[in-house]
Amino acid sequence: MAPTILLTGKNGQIGAELCRLLPTLGNLVSFGRHELDLSKPDSIRDAVRHLRPQLIVNAAAYTQVDQAEKEEPAAYAVNAEAPALLAEEAGKLGAVLVHYSTDYVFDGSKNSPYDEADSPNPLNAYGRTKLAGEQAIRASGVAHLIFRTSWVYSPRGRNFLLTILRLSTERDELRVVSDQRGAPTSSREIAAATLRVLASLAARGWQPDSFSAVAGTYHMTAAGETSWHQFAEAILEERSRVSSDVPWLAAATGNLPLLTRRVVPISTAEYPTPARRPAYSVLSNARLQQTFGFQLPHWRDQLHSIFLPS
Ligand SMILES: NC(=O)c1ccc[n+]([C@@H]2O[C@H](COP(=O)([O-])OP(=O)(O)OC[C@H]3O[C@@H](n4cnc5c(N)ncnc54)[C@H](OP(=O)(O)O)[C@@H]3O)[C@@H](O)[C@H]2O)c1
């Protein structure tokens, strides 16, 4: 029988893409913040107990990295306490919990890709709250998959891609940090990879027992690595190549012409932000590859794909 799937964060970058894909797996019931506020424990309990899903996919999170420095308790409620409660409720039902986490659980002191066994040491409040969410899920004993991803962008929401496109219509020169390295990952690819993993597990049913061999934490990011500066240059390169109509791009630029002539590399010290960020947060996807037999496309190919007419 098709599983009932409870999805949170349906209006987010990853959640919106999951909304399109998850119905192929089961009966999807998706919630935005207004239908299910993760900062309200009772609304979480009510939703899960009422729906009795076999699968819960938690794509909601407090994702404002700088703002979290000022309101860590609010971030903690959504990123740590809510996942803990979802895990507890899922455990009681014998449901599987899928959750997303971040490269910002690491401090960036490595200079080769982080794997799942590396010790986290977040530099900022957001990373601390996300790590606490991961730990609570593991401690609950629920059958779970935690996908750590990074530098997420999409044609919707708030992200670096849309910021650069907007600024490219306003400024002759952009100054972008070149000493932080990571892997920009499209929310479409994260949703597609999530579906691929879940489809391979669907064959085994949603029973926690049959799930235990593959349960755990996986890094799920684009292949390759880059800096914010190189990513910005690549965005503008794609923008200047687009010949046909791409509706989201027209909305992002307001149909205004490209003004930016130069993208100047700057250091993190020249662009101070409230939250410290890791200088290096590339994640190894070897475990995903070994367990499920695939990896996500290279970041440059992902970026190119998003500019193709859909
Ligand atoms: N964005 C990144 O660069 C990045 C990097 C690494 C990992 N991740 C992780 O990937 C996952 C998905 O992130 P995303 O990029 O898709 O984030 P996003 O676009 O910011 O979406 C998050 C969604 O969560 C919702 N939300 C926030 N507070 C809520 C609350 N109290 N109750 C219910 N819903 C609430 C938001 O609702 P509103 O639309 O109403 O605000 C939003 O739709 C998160 O776990 C995030 O930590 C993201």
Image (cartoon, helix red, strand yellow):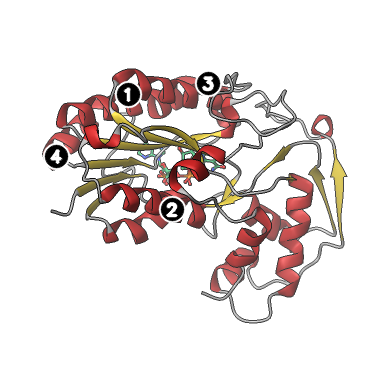
- The residue identified by callout 4 is 52
Which comes before the other along the chain, label 4 or label 3?
A: 4
Report crowding for label 1: few under 14, some 14 to 19, many 20 or more residues within 10 A (C-alpha).
many
Q: Is mark 1 on a helix, strand or loop?
A: helix
Which comes before the other along the chain, label 4 or label 2?
A: 4
Residue 140 placed where, x, y %? 30, 20
Residue 267 placed where, x, y %? 84, 35
Q: What element carries label 2?
A: helix
Residue 208 placed where, x, y %? 23, 33
Q: Is mark 3 on a helix, strand or loop?
A: helix
Residue visible at 50% across and 51% down in the picture: 294
Label 4 sits on what residue type?
Arg
Q: Is mark 4 on a helix, strand or loop?
A: loop
Residue 60 vs 308, above or below: the answer is above
Q: How far apart are marks 1 and 2 (CA)?
A: 22 Å
Report crowding for label 4: few under 14, some 14 to 19, many 20 or more residues within 10 A (C-alpha).
some
Residue 220 vs 117, above or below: the answer is below
Residue 81 vs 236, above or below: the answer is above
Label 2 sits on what residue type?
Ala
Which comes before the other along the chain, label 2 or label 3?
A: 3
Label ID, residue 128: 3
Q: How far apart are marks 3 and 1 (CA)?
A: 14 Å
- The residue identified by callout 2 is 191
Q: Distance between the residues labelled 4 and 2?
A: 23 Å
Front one among 67 and 86: 86
Place residue 88 in its image quadrant.
top left
Front one among 151 and 92: 92
Residue visible at 68% across and 29% down in the picture: 277
- The residue identified by callout 1 is 84
